[in-house]
Image: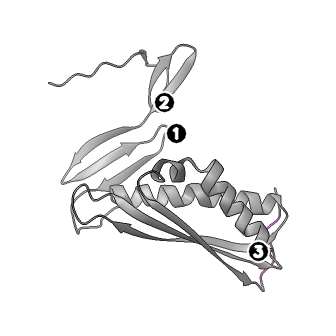
Amino acid sequence: ILTASVSGAYSPQCNLCYCWIMGDEVKKIHTIEYAGDEFLKVNTASGHTLTVDVKSGRRAAPGPLELFITGLASCTAADVISILLKKREKVTAYRVEVHTERREEHPRSFTKIELTHIVEGHNVAPEAVARAIDLSTNKYCSAVSTVRPTAEVVTKYQIVESNRAPESAP
C-alpha cells in the first residue's frame, strides 16, 4: 500500500465531492475510480460524473487527452465569447476548432496546439476578435497558460458575415 501525506483535514460535510480543509478554505478535489474494462469514472469537484475510456481504439467515451484538449479549448472559448459580447459585438455563432501535434516518443506530450476561432456575426470588428483572443491566451485562460511552457500555442481567427440574428450581450 502506497500512502501519501496531505496537509489538511478530510471534510465529510461536502456531499458533492471529497474536500480537504486548508485553514479557513475548503479545497474540492476530483476523484477518479477504475470502473472495469478500461473505463474510469470521474467525479469532478463541481459534482459532475463522467466516464473516460482508456482502451485504445474503442472510443466508447472521451479519452483523457481528448478531455484535456477540449477543456483547454473550452477555457479560451469561454473567455473570447464573453469578451466579444461585453464589447457588444454582434456575434451570431462562435466555435473553436483545435488541431494538435504530439511528440512521437513517450511521453507523447503536445508540441503544438492550434486554436482557430470562428466568429460569425454582423460587422464584427477584427480588432475586437484579435484583442479578445490575445486577452484569453495571454492573460485569462489558465489552461493555455499551463501548456505554454511545453507546447507552442498558435491562435488564428476567421470572421464570417451572418444572416442570423445576433446574440444579446449579458
Camera-near label (2 vs 3) is 3
Q: Which residue corresponds to mark 1?
A: 46
Using the image, determine if residue 120 lies above or below residue 63.
below
Q: Which residue corresponds to mark 2?
A: 28
Taking the image as shown, residue 169 lies to the left or right of residue 132, namely: right
Instruction: Classify mark 1: residues with Cα within 10 Å, few (<14), some (14-19) or many (20+).
Output: few
The type of residue carrying mark 2 is Lys
* Separation of marks 2 and 1 at Cα, in angstroms: 8 Å
The type of residue carrying mark 1 is Ser
Taking the image as shown, residue 46 lies to the left or right of residue 90, namely: left
Type of colouring: one colour
* Separation of marks 2 and 3 at Cα, in angstroms: 39 Å
Q: Which residue corresponds to mark 3?
A: 126
Residue at 76%, 74% (x, y): give it.
126
Which SS class for mark 3?
helix
Residue at 73%, 62% (x, y): give it.
131
In the image, 132 versus 119, the foreground residue is 132
For marks 2 and 1 on the same chain, the one whose residue lies earlier in the sequence: 2
Question: Which range is magenta?
Answer: 164-168
Say if the magenta span includes residue 37. no
Taking the image as shown, residue 139 lies to the left or right of residue 7, namely: right
Tell me where residue 36 appears, x and y as whole percent: 19, 49
Can you tell which quarter of the image residue 37 is in? Answer: bottom left
Residue at 32%, 41% (x, y): give it.
32
Using the image, determine if residue 90 lies above or below residue 153.
below
Which SS class for mark 1?
loop
For marks 2 and 3 on the same chain, the one whose residue lies earlier in the sequence: 2
| Disc 2 to disc 1: CB gap under 8 Å | yes
Q: Quadrant of the N terminus?
A: top left
